[in-house]
Amino acid sequence: GTTFECTRDDIAWRAEATSNPGAERVERFFPTSVDADALAVTSDAVFVDEDHGDKPSIVKRLDPRTGKRIWARRVGDADRVAAGTERVWVANGAKGQAMGLDARTGRIASTTTVGPGSFDAIAPLTPQPLAITADAVWVATSGGLVRLDPATGQETTRVPVGAAETVVAGPKG
């Protein structure tokens, strides 16, 4: 379904609407305890990046039916999240890193440096610096695109196209 955010009486909510435009209804609301900066949805999970100001961000896996927390992981300064079938990927622009979390357990599976470790290492002001395909994780950086192996998190390709503003990938990568 389509995801979006809304605010009601200074309470942040995240919603998933059906992908059937004729239905025009919200299926479910998930209250969040703090500012939720990013959201990623798969067929069996909702992943939320909660910003805690000057404290480390926390990525949580929620059950899409109940909204109950399955796991939570402190991830440092998370800018965005994207989810594949096996991993949840977190972009950390402050450290110039892409972190892969095991989607089932929240365990850190890999941490890969993709940029110089400054706030603009991962494309500054990028609405979505991560894209996931079956065989690749693409990261938009201030120097171009970086392709990671989704199983290991290892860098496989660097495409120097200058500052990438966003990254989108189709099913064939």
Image (tube, rainbow, N blue to C red):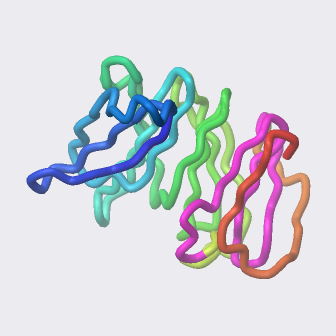
**Nearest the camera: 158 or 7?**
7
Residue 89 point in image, percent of width and height: 61, 45
| Number of numbered discs visible in the structure rendering | 0
Image coords of residue 43 (percent x, y): 56, 24
On the picture, is 41 further left or further right than 53?
right
- Residue 109 x/y as whole percent: 65, 36
Residue 95: give x, y in percent of width and height. Answer: 58, 67
Residue pushed farthest top? Answer: 65
The image quadrant that residue 56 belongs to is: bottom left
- At horizontal 51% and vertical 35% (from top left) the residue drawn is 41
For the point 15% across and 51% down, which residue is it?
8
Q: Is residue 97 above or below residue 45?
A: below
* Residue 56 appears in view: yes
Furthest residue toward bottom: 162
Q: Is residue 117 above or below residue 106?
A: below
- Residue range (magenta): 124-151
Would residue 168 appear left or right of 59 to someone viewing this image? right
Residue 109: in magenta span: no
